[in-house]
Image (cartoon, rainbow, N blue to C red):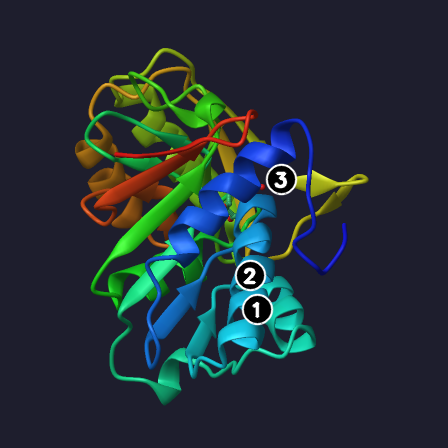
Amino acid sequence: MPDAPTSPTGAEAGKFAAARRAVDLIGDGMTVGLGTGSTAAWMVRALAARVKSEGMTLTCVPTSSRTGALATRLGLNVVTLEDVETLDLTIDGADEFDPAFRLIKGGGAAHLQEKIVAAASKRLVVITDPSKDVAHLGAFPLPVEVTPFGHTATLRLIQQVVNQADVDGREITMRQHEAVPVITDEGNVVYDLHLGRIGDPEALMRDLTCLPGVVETGLFLGLCDTVIIGHPDGRAETR
Ligand code: 5RP
């Protein structure tokens, strides 16, 4: 994928449209959280182009090593979350959003850092395409980040929670890439919960996050205030 925000086509055109609309929310001097994923990568490219053409001064906090590498390569001023007190805005992608702007994130296994950065931000703006718009969360497998130590014991606890939850599916798989477990930036593993439909996201998040060994879930509840949907014809719709 090119570094410069040229003119993408098809599904990428929608992501680019949403990314450009979100970048318009950024003003000179702001501290900005940079999300992770293909849509967020378009935003980083569009932001770098705007900084270059307008000479803006920004402070950027990435939500993953991948995003940090891209932003640095494109010349953005990248710092860590420890270097700032608060962020004006974080712009990130999502795997699903519902009418209450509850999200499933973590398709890129970056949801731990993404949630910490979002929680430190005054606003979380999600950029997405229409396929992520759902009536109920859960068709996308819910990522749960778990410490490597004792992860099979933690899996049994997660399974107990899932067995008692208001969901349609109960299968759990370990995230792997080419038969090797995916390791997150924080050195953890990821289990994907194939739930089909999550009846009570708040209860599920509460029950999962209190388990020993669970570091974070991909449920983002009460964090997002705006969703920008990019359509393949290049339209961007703000909700
Ligand atoms: C990474 C994420 C991403 O934001 C999410 O997976 C969406 O990615 P994409 O924009 O590539 O569809 O949560 O952990």
Q: Nearer the viewer, residue 33 or 6?
A: 6
Residue 208 lies, with reference to residue 204, above or below; the image says below
Amino acid type of disc 2?
Answer: Val
Circles 2, 1 touching at the beta carbon (< 8 Å): yes
Q: Which residue is mark 3?
A: 175
Left or right: residue 169 compared with residue 137: right
Q: Which residue is mark 1?
A: 48
Q: CA distance from mark 2 to mark 1?
A: 6 Å
Percent position of residue 67, x then y: 59, 64
Q: CA distance from mark 2 to mark 3?
A: 26 Å
Q: Mark 3 or mark 1: which is in front?
A: 1
Q: CA distance from mark 3 to mark 1?
A: 32 Å
The label shown at residue 152 is: none
Left or right: residue 199 compared with residue 178: left
Image quarter for residue 74?
A: bottom right
Q: Mark 2 or mark 1: which is in front?
A: 1
Residue at the limit of the structure toward the top, as seen here? 168
The local crowd at label 3, few if under 14, some if 14 to 19, many if 20 or more residues have their Cα within 10 Å, is some
- Considering only order in the chain, which callout, 3 or 2, is on the residue closer to the N terminus? 2
The local crowd at label 2, few if under 14, some if 14 to 19, many if 20 or more residues have their Cα within 10 Å, is many
Residue at the limit of the structure toward the right, as seen here? 178
Left or right: residue 215 compared with residue 221: right
Q: Residue at x 45, y 75 (%)?
A: 60
The secondary element bearing badge 2 is classed as helix
Residue 225 lies, with reference to residue 147, above or below; the image says above
Residue at the limit of the structure toward the front, as seen here? 54
The label shown at residue 44 is: 2
Image quarter for residue 30?
A: bottom left
- Considering only order in the chain, which callout, 1 or 3, is on the residue closer to the N terminus? 1
